[in-house]
Amino acid sequence: SSADHPNVTVIPVGDSWPLDVAAAESELRRIADEESNIRVAFLEETNGDPQRRIETWLDTRLFRLDEQWFGPVRVLSFAGDGQVTLTILLEARFGGGITLESVEVLDTVSPPGGLIRIRLNWRADSSISQSLKVFVHLFAGEAIVAQHDGQPVGELRPTNTWQAGERIADQFAIRFPSDAPPGKYQLRIGMYDVNSLMRLPVSMPDGATGEFFVGGEVVVR
């Protein structure tokens, strides 16, 4: 309840009928400018917003952290935008039809329990027939301490909707556990088929191949 969380402000967005998209997006921009952490509750949202424009706005401008269900209510948590502190230029080619052009990391230093905001910049080199999920691991040695697993853009842009030449920015946040040991962690990024669970092979410009890209560095301290 709000009594248990006195610093929580409840703001109705998109409750007009028909949906006033411009007004909803204006209010979302105002909220995002003022708040660094946002939770959004959806209830039968496709009745008034069948194109899911509110959720698309959130997923393309903020960084989705998680999704929870409370009966019929779906609650999404987002971290706000910020400055990119690490850019990894890749041109890593997955499965012959998808290229990961670059990775942008907004948080290269985090306390235990903190967030890492990541943006993956994809390019469809051809039309994609497969439904693929993206996985991102934060790991050190053999230990994966935190991860993201899902279809791109909060599952609003499955890969089988991508068209040749299209670029897709997929951004999200990953939370380190509160007991994450201090130290350096790397990113492991790959894709796998939703149905077969088979990972796509990836090839790098230097000719190296594998099941995923490994690189970057994030520090917990």
Image (cartoon, helix red, strand yellow):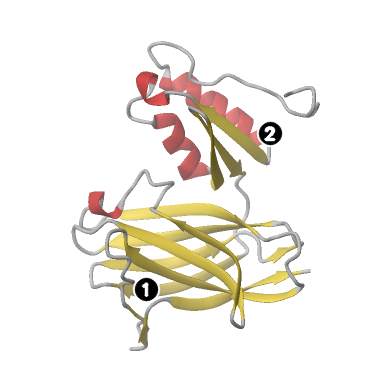
Amino acid at dot 1? Glu
The N terminus: image quadrant: top right
The C terminus: image quadrant: bottom right
Q: Residue at x 41, y 76 (%)?
A: 212
Give the secondary structure at mark 1. Answer: strand
Relative to 124, does residue 156 appear above or below in the rendering?
above
Which of 34/69 is in front?
69
Q: Residue at x 27, y 56 (%)?
A: 131
Residue 218: % across, % down:
65, 70
Measured Cα–Cα span from mark 2 to mark 1: 35 Å
- The residue carrying mark 2 is 34
Relative to 83, does residue 60 appear above or below in the rendering?
above
Q: Earlier in the sequence, mark 2 or mark 1?
A: 2
| Label annotation for residue 91 | 1
Which of 101/1 is in front?
1
Q: Is the residue marked by circle 1 packed among few (<14), some (14-19), or many (20+) residues within 10 Å?
A: some
| Label annotation for residue 18 | none
Q: Is residue 132 found left or right of 16 in the rendered image? A: left
The image quarter in which residue 92 lies: bottom left
Give the secondary structure at mark 2. Answer: helix
Number of marks drawn? 2
Q: Residue at x 23, y 67 (%)?
A: 97
- Point out the residue furthest to the bottom here: 207
Residue 45: % across, % down:
42, 24
